[in-house]
Image: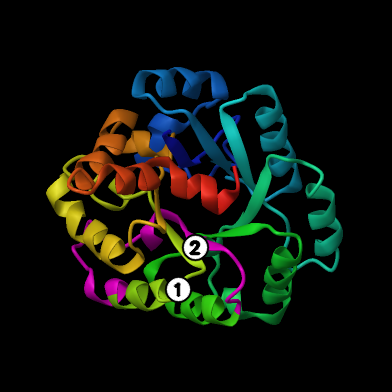
Amino acid sequence: MIIDSHQHFWNYEPKKHEWIDDSMKVIRRDFSPEDLKQVYQDNNVDGCVAVQADQTLEETNFLIQLSEDYDFIKGVVGWVDLRSYAVEEDLERYTHFKSVKGFRHVVQGEPDHNFVLRPDFTKGIFALHRYNFTYDILVFPHQLGAVLELVRRFGNQKFVIDHIAKPYIKDGFIDGWALLMKEIAKQENVYCKLSGMITEADFNTWTPEQIRPYMDVVLEAFGTDRIMFGSDWPVCLVAGNYSKVKQLTTDFIAGLSPDEQARIMGLNAVKFYNL
């Protein structure tokens, strides 16, 4: 079973999706389950986890509706305002939807390096565990120090790092990122997605050899039980195509045992998100 642990859908709106700059104009259009359905058939993928791309409750509800219409959408990572006084009401409401597995905040866009440690945010993280929801960590490397403190503080909360924390692959910087990732991985409640890597390299000239050292760090740190394949479709289309993204991971893990490969390509996502 192959599960894509990280992809997105959207109805493109220039203002809502202003993060899609000119270098990414190839994805300035709608992306629907109908588009992805064919991609999965072509690449032998069995299902996916749909992850929020907009920070509104409407986005969460949009993804829930898609999951009800398409069986291959096995789970949803939505958004709620974890800083809201009403966060527990929101979380309680979403427990009634089987597809909702967890939540995410676009922390990479927050100017405060310590955003995830602020009391109003950690209050929301504390509530997630009470309702058995996961949390996807979307950050840049300079925010990993705060992430380390967060995951140590909440040892019972299930976390997963998106896009291997977006290391500076294009520039070849690895040491500071690697040091913090290894420390974070010591917390057994933290998983990591092998996703979003080609878009942190040069869109046009990246090679698997350039990305492999970063994947080596993640595999060594988290092991085969706590990493999972993710495509980051359709964002990945700015630097390649679905087949190339999948092959990047399958080639990397080809030397592992069949059981280990199966865990990385699907079973770990099933376990983490309770699919």
Give residue 17's position: percent from left, percent from top: 56, 41
The image shows residue 175, relative to residue 15, as above or below, that is: below
Residue 149 part of the magenta segment: no
Q: Residue 234: percent from the left, percent from the top?
A: 44, 34
Say whether residue 58 is left or right of residue 10: right
The residue at the point 39 percent across, 57 percent down is 225
Which residue type carries mark 2?
Gln
The x, y position of residue 219, in whole percent, is 28, 60
Q: Name the residue tied to disc 1.
A: 143
Above or below residue 159? Residue 55 is above
Residue segment shown in magenta: 154-178
Residue pictured at 50% horizontal, 60% vertical: 160
State the separation of the CA atoms marked 1 and 2. 8 Å
- Specify the label residue 47 is tagged with: none
Q: Quadrant of the C terminus?
A: top right
Local SS, label 2: helix
Residue 174: in magenta span: yes
Q: Which residue is labeled 2 in the image?
A: 108
Q: Is residue 7 above or below residue 29?
A: below
Q: Residues within 10 Å of mark 1 (few under 14, many from 20)?
A: many
For the residue carrying disc 2, how many other residues have a C-alpha within 10 Å: few (<14), some (14-19), or many (20+)? Answer: some
Q: Earlier in the sequence, mark 1 or mark 2?
A: 2
Residue visible at 12% across and 50% down? 209
Label 1: element kind: helix
Residue shown at 83% from the left, 55% from the top: 92
- Amino acid at dot 1: Gln
Front-lying residue, 120 or 43 = 43
